[in-house]
């Protein structure tokens, strides 16, 4: 079940620039309960190549990055963004997820990794970028549900993943089931798996080469 956000009220969206050019923060005047980010992504102030930080809180309506080439940073390093609608990440955009620990914060607060909780559908065509926050080092088998959806979920984009030592690597995949929405939901999970061995990669290259010769 989706977490309850107290005090359901509409508040005015504010888009403010930090001291660094090209870095925008989506905030809200008053209590940050339910608001939309559609105007932020579509604003003429936001240009290709800009970074848009979306603060933790509940957003009413669809979350759509639009046609601009943007980097989206969710949460408050890290944080949870609730989307009461659908989520569309277009091919030109990158979403940077910080992972700094195991606590999701969904029930206890103080999340240690960035998350989107989406009541509707998720169509992710852009780039998933994982950043290990404050020196966090995961272990084999660790997994982090970075997006949860109450509707359908598709991922046809690409990934930018940090290197891991000890023969390990990151992997991003969509799986059925969600801690927030149950068996009918979906999750995009970043997990730590064994890295493909050099021998396995050589063998795979040989198979591809053989198939090309037969063709």
Image: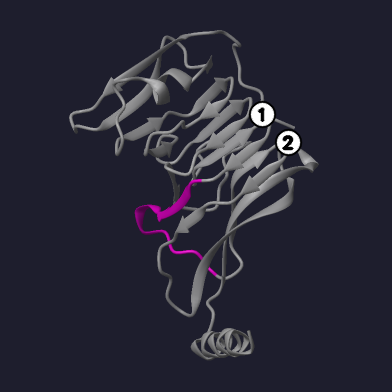
Q: Is residue 101 left or right of residue 144?
A: left
Q: Return the disc, 2 or 1, that comes first in the chain's sequence.
A: 1
Q: Residue at x 53, y 32 (%)?
A: 81
Q: Is residue 169 left or right of residue 27?
A: right
- Above or below: residue 194 compared with residue 110: below
Residue 190 position by quadrant: bottom right
Magenta-span inclusion, residue 128: yes
Residue corresponding to mark 1:
3
Give neighbour class at mark 1: few <14, some 14-19, many 20+ (Cα, 10 Å).
Answer: few
Give the residue at the far front of this rendering. 215
Q: As rendered, which of 27 and 49 lies closer to the eye? A: 49
Callout 1 secondary element: loop
- For residue 151, the mark is 2
Q: Residue at x 54, y 22 (%)?
A: 59
Q: Residue at x 31, y 35 (%)?
A: 48
Q: As rendered, which of 134 and 130 lies closer to the eye? A: 130
């Amino acid at each position: 079940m989706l977490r309850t956000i107290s005090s359901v009220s509409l508040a005015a969206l504010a888009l403010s620039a930090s001291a660094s050019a090209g870095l925008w923060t989506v905030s809200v005047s008053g209590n940050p309960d339910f608001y939309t980010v559609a105007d932020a992504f579509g604003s003429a102030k936001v240009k290709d190549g800009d970074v848009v930080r979306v603060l933790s809180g509940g957003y009413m309506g669809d979350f759509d990055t639009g046609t601009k080439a943007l980097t989206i940073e969710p949460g408050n390093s890290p944080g949870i963004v609730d989307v009461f609608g659908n989520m569309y990440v277009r091919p030109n955009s990158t979403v940077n997820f910080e992972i700094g620990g195991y606590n999701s914060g969904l029930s206890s607060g103080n999340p240690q990794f960035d998350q989107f909780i989406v009541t509707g559908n998720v169509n992710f065509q852009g780039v998933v970028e994982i950043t290990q926050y404050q020196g966090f080092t995961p272990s084999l088998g660790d997994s982090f549900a970075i997006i949860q959806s109450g509707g359908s979920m598709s991922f046809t984009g690409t990934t930018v993943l940090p290197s891991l030592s000890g023969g390990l690597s990151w992997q991003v995949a969509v799986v059925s089931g969600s801690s927030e929405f149950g068996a009918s939901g979906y999750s995009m999970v970043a997990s730590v798996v064994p890295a493909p061995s050099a021998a396995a990669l050589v063998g795979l290259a040989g198979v591809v080469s053989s198939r090309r010769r037969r063709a």
